[in-house]
Every structure is written in C-alpha cells, then in structure tokens.
Image (cartoon, grey):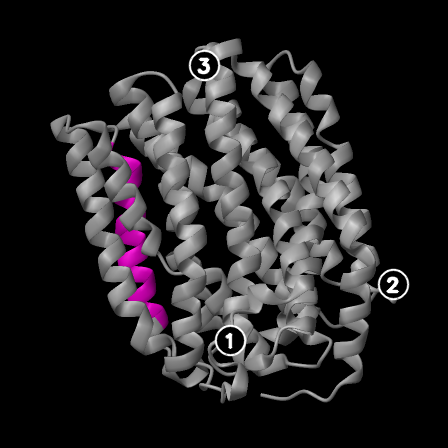
Amino acid sequence: MSNPYREIFRAPGAKSFSAAGFIARLPWVMATLGIVTMLSQTHGGYWLAGAVAATFAFANSLIAPQISRLVDRYGQSRVLPPATALTVVALAGLMLATRLGAPAWTLFLFAMLAGFMPSMGALVRARWTEIYRDTPKLHTAFAFESVIDEVIYMAGPVISIGLSVALFPEAGPLAATLFLAVGTLLFVLQKATEPPVHAQGRSAGTSVIRLGSVRIIVLTLIAIGAIFGTAEVTAVAFAEQQSLKAAASLVLASYAAGSLIVGLVFGTLKLRMPLARQLVLAIGLAALTTLPLLVIGSLPVLAGVLFLAGAAVSPTLIISMGLIERVVPAAKLTEGVTWAMTGVGIGMALGSSLSGWVIDQFGAASGFWVSIAAGVMALATVLLGYRHVEEQARECAMQPAVA
C-alpha cells in the first residue's frame, strides 16, 4: 500500500519549500511564548507578559492578511523580504527594550511592529494548492502541514522556553528572530514552486473576509485559538506554581503530540461526509475536551489531559483549510488561508491576555475556565453558521474553478 505522504513529495521542489517553510514558521510560536517567558522573568507577573504577547499575536492577526493580499497581487518573492526585515528589526527592538528596562509602552510598540511577520503557513499551503488543486492529494498535503504545525508547537515551546530559562531571558526571542530571517530567505529562493500571480478580476479590491462562510470559519477559529492561548499561559503559570517552570514546554509539547498523531491518521482518510459537518463534529470534540482541565492537580495529569485534548486540533485545522480552499477564489487563496490561521492567532491573543489576568487574580488553575468558555463559544458559532457554510461550499463545488 502506497504512503500518501510520500506521494505528495514526488512533486519537484516540494521537499525544499516545505523544509524552508518549517524553519520560517518556528518563530511564530517561539516569539509568542518567548515573550511570555522573557517578560515574566524580567518584570515578574503574567499580566504584562501576556498582554505584550497578545499585542504581538493580535497585531499579526490583523496585519498578516494584508501582507497576504499583497502576496496574492504581487507574488511571494516581492513581498516577503521587506515584511520579514521589518519584523526582525522590531523583535530586536523588543529584546533590547527588555534588556535595558525601557518603559512598558516601548514593549507594546515593538510587539505591535513585530506583527508584520508573514503567515508562512499560508504561503506554504498556497504552494501545495497550486500543485495539487482539485485532487485528493491536496487533503493529504493540508493534513501534512497541520501535522507540521503541531511539530512546531512541540518544538517551539521546548526551544523558546528552554533557552530563556537556561541561558538568559531574551534567548528564546533571539532564536526565533534568527529562524525567521534564515527560513524566509531559503523559502524565497525556491522560485520554481512559487505560485504565479492570478488575475484578480473585478474583486481585486475586495477582501475575502467579506464572504459570510469565511467569517464564520474565522470566528470559530478565534474561539478555538483562545483555547490554545489559555493553555500556553496557564501551563507556564501552573508549572511555575509547582516550581518546575521549565517543564511547561514539555506539557505543551504533549498537547501538540496528541494533535500530531491524530492529524497523521486523519490525513490518510477519505471521508465522504461534507466538510461543514466534519467541522461541527471536530469543534464539538474540542469543546468537550476542555472540561477535564478543571480537575488538574499535577503536571503529569495536565500533560495527559492536554494530550487527549489535542486530538481535536489537527482535524479542526485540516477541515477549516479544506473549506477555505473550497469557498475562496483561487486568486485570493493566500489571503483566505491567512485569515483562517490568524483567526487562531486572534483567539490566542485574547486567550493569553484574559487568562493572564485571571491567573494573577485567582491562581494558575483558574485560567482554564477561559478554555471552557472558549469551547462553548466555538461550538455555538459553528452550529449557528453551519447551514450557511455547507450551502456555500456546495455551491462552489458545483462551479468550475476560475482564477
């Protein structure tokens, strides 16, 4: 029996752009967690650390789709270098401001400017779509990228938190900055697989966020992202309460491991169930798995619960990307995927900021209440918008592909 993952890499250049994209995507997770770890060490408390990290994530969630719109219109190799250069300078400024004890407003300023970081996950998926559009291999490619996302969520915390705790507070963000610069350069050099610029047509000035189905998917992913963001900040705070702060990276890695394993299996399946219905089931599972977080008493138990909770992560992202590819015009795919991914980022920003405040007020374990509330909101959103998303996906599937 052939390996579907091996098959997708038979395309020329696939291994090269995927590897470069992996390096360039590490910084997103590393930067967010690195900021939390760096500032919690240098300033004490989690409100400031969570708020600055949330500023970065929220700014990126708003700016990255605009960068992706430029990519759709002018190409990856023209847009990525200046956007990456600005991000590198901003991250360097954030680290320097932390080292010098600059006023808090400077931290928020540099965090906001660092939000110009490109959505590398969307750019990689755009290349896969150009190669395998309208074929079963695209589902496998999206599944592979979701698994890579989870590998990044496993490796990113270990590297970022580990470096900041073991060496010096700024070590995690510094490593993220270097990965971003090197990874993006290698990615841009892969010219052969860069998607061509499609004709924008009459909708050139219209953002895909105006599509009702896209808004529903993004709102759902915002709530799902809040679960992720809460888990990150609360796990770090919970580990510190147990005097094992460095172990937080391993706890978060278990969350990603659960998602990775399920994602690998899900990517090999060829389900006949409509994508909209699959999304409802995945979100329902995600909401259900937040409930055990209320009875956590130790780090090993937390790691086990998060491992099980990760089972809903990859399917949710894979299905969401499949729906986006189905309902968004080909000429605006990068922007559409970016909105979906940054919807998660917005949720993470809200979740980390709110849970940071809850933790400072009521203790580490209380932060998981934010996860439960976010799970309920995600399920309510997808249920209310289910029929609209299903109908639009069906209509688009009946239409011929156009640029």
Which element carries disc 3, helix, strand or loop?
A: helix
Task: State if disc 1 and disc 2 touch (CB < 8 Å).
Answer: no
173 vs 269: above or below: above
Residue drawn at point x = 55 percent, y = 30 percent: 230
Q: Is residue 84 magenta?
A: no
Position of 35 compared to 5: left or right?
left
Which element carries disc 2, helix, strand or loop?
A: loop
Residue drawn at point x = 79 percent, y = 77 percent: 395
Three-letter code, disc 2: Met
Range shown magenta:
170-187
Q: Main secondary structure of the magenta part?
A: helix
Three-letter code, disc 1: Arg
Position of 330 compared to 42: left or right?
right
Residue 273 numbered tag:
2
Residue 360 numbered tag:
3
State the residue position of label 1.
Answer: 127
Which residue is most to the right?
272
The quarter of the picture where the N terminus appears is: bottom right
Which element carries disc 1, helix, strand or loop?
A: helix
- In this view of the protein, which residue sits in the foreground, 161 or 43? 43
Three-letter code, disc 3: Asp
346 vs 67: above or below: above
Residue drawn at point x = 71 percent, y = 61 percent: 267
- The answer to which image quadrant residue 300 occupies is top right
